[in-house]
């Protein structure tokens, strides 16, 4: 069976629990009902790219158009996760290539990727694909007690 990249706004139900598993793999809190609610609340232009073989989800990318007063709209990969068992097998490369295609089709000049400063393997992966580090920033968060 061949790897396929599906572009969707609403993933088929068969992939919801698998999306949840991939998010949990990265030690992020996730439950299928929560992921379903999050998908429903995404901005209408957001897209998910699903890397699948049959009904098995190997990875995904969440794409968004970002708007700013300071910059022209850009395409952004909000998140990209590949199952650990399928890393270094071309799945991530195919997801990034599909994200670039989506950004070009939407007439965006840039595709922005974010990754945590500690994820050095991801840094090497993006650099190998021709991406250049453009900024270093620190994210501040305040828990507002609403969730």
Image (cartoon, helix red, strand yellow):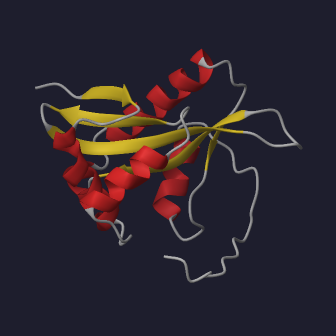
Q: Residue furthest right?
A: 70
Left or right: where 137 falls relative to 70 = left
113 and 89: which is toward the camera: 113
Left or right: where 126 falls relative to 140 = left
Q: Quadrant of residue 40?
A: top left
Question: Residue at left 10%, top 26%?
Answer: 1
Question: Residue at left 74%, top 63%?
Answer: 136
Q: How many marks?
A: 0
141 vs 45: above or below: below
76 and 115: which is toward the camera: 76
Q: Quadrant of residue 109?
A: top right
Left or right: where 127 falls relative to 58 = right
Q: Quadrant of residue 60?
A: top left
Location of residue 146 in the rendering, given as x and y in whole percent from the top left corner: 54, 77
Location of residue 70 in the rendering, given as x and y in whole percent from the top left corner: 89, 43
Location of residue 37 in the rendering, given as x and y in whole percent from the top left corner: 38, 54
101 vs 110: above or below: above
Location of residue 52 in the rendering, given as x and y in whole percent from the top left corner: 22, 34
Question: Residue at left 52%, top 36%?
Answer: 46
Question: Residue at left 36%, top 66%?
Answer: 26
111 and 91: which is toward the camera: 111
Q: Residue furthest front?
A: 146
């Amino acid at each position: 069976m061949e790897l396929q990249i599906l572009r969707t706004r609403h993933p088929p139900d068969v992939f919801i629990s698998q999306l949840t598993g991939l998010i949990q793999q990265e030690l992020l809190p996730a439950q299928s009902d929560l992921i379903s609610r999050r998908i429903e609340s995404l901005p209408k232009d957001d897209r998910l790219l699903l890397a699948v073989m049959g009904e098995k989800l190997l990875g995904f990318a969440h794409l968004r158009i970002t708007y700013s007063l300071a910059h022209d709209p850009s395409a952004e990969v909000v998140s990209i996760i590949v199952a650990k068992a399928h890393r270094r097998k071309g799945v991530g490369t195919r997801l990034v290539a599909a994200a670039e295609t989506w950004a070009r089709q939407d007439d965006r000049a840039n595709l922005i990727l974010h990754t945590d400063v500690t994820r050095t393997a991801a840094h090497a992966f993006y650099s190998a694909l021709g991406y250049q580090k453009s900024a270093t920033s620190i994210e501040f968060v305040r828990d507002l007690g609403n969730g």
